[in-house]
Amino acid sequence: MSTTTTTHTPLTLKDILGDLEVPELSPEESALAEAILRGDDTVEVPELLLEEILVETDPKFEVAKGLAQRIKDMPTGQRIKLAFKGGREARSILLRDSNRLVKRLVLQNPRISEDELVILARNKAEDREMIEMVAKNSDWTKSYQLRHALVCNPKTPMPTAIRFVATLQDREVRQLAKSKNVPSSVSSTAKRVLLQRSGTTGGGGGGGH
């Protein structure tokens, strides 16, 4: 799948954090994070972890994978930089980081891909704030697979999930209408959408890319 792009590059922590407080972030780390966002930091990270290595046949793949396993032991500054600028191996590990700022910065990485976002949205154990960040990004939710994943995740804000139901194809809507694994508001909305579509000609409504 193609790499998605964020609508803008945030220049301050406030752009990323919003009202979220990250108590584990010291003033020094906050200043360092600001410098990383501006691109004038002096933090050094393994160059290989900045590369986008996508195939296991790439000679660099195993080396990058081995380096990535050391990320959890890196200082916060290095993890912040890799979250914002790292390649796929780094992102996959940092999306599970215990520091909430680090996780949020992965979503601001301009190389994060559609399939990474779909995997995150399908994870019902994911932090609610991460699901909400994905759900409110109008560029990302142009993806049909991502909208479907969000509808099925109970942590998606309910108004958003309900709105997305009507954008899905009949097959998925029928599954939602019968499912016991989605919120009742979603299944009842799916039933209503099916009834509405059954009264129109042509069928197969919804859809998307």
Image: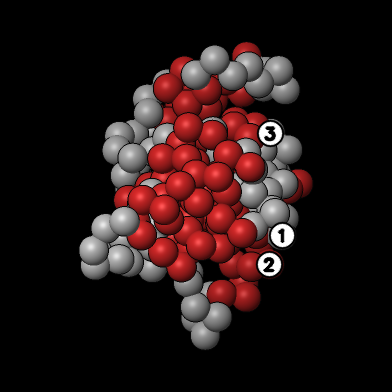
The answer to whether residue 112 is seen in the rendering is no
Image spot of residue 129 (x, y percent): 59, 32
Residue at figure coordinates x 46%, y 47% from the top left: 192
Residue at figure coordinates x 56%, y 63% from the top left: 175
Q: How crowded is mark 1: few (under 14 residues within 10 Å), some or many (20 or more)?
A: few
Q: Name the residue under label 1.
A: 69
Q: Residue furthest front?
A: 199
Q: Name the residue under label 3.
A: 99
Q: Is mark 3 on a helix, strand or loop?
A: loop
Residue at figure coordinates x 57%, y 48% from the top left: 187
Q: Is mark 2 on a helix, strand or loop?
A: helix
Distance (Cα) linking label 1 and label 2: 5 Å
**Which mark lies nearer to you, 2 or 3?**
3
**Which mark lies nearer to you, 3 or 1?**
3
Q: Mark 2 points at which residue?
A: 66
Q: Earlier in the sequence, mark 3 or mark 1?
A: 1
Distance (Cα) linking label 3 and label 1: 17 Å
Q: Is mark 1 on a helix, strand or loop?
A: loop
Q: What residue type is labelled 3?
A: Asn
Tag of residue 118: none
Residue situated in front as seen by the camera: 87 or 103:
103
Viewport quadrant of the C terminus: bottom left
36 is higher (above) or lower (below) than 53: above
Distance (Cα) linking label 2 and label 3: 22 Å
Image spot of residue 32 (x, y percent): 54, 25
Q: Which amino acid does label 1 sit on?
A: Gln
Residue situated in front as seen by the camera: 96 or 201:
201
The answer to whether residue 190 is seen in the rendering is yes
Q: What residue type is labelled 2?
A: Gly
144 is higher (above) or lower (below) than 55: above
Q: Which residue lies furthest to the bottom in this view?
A: 57
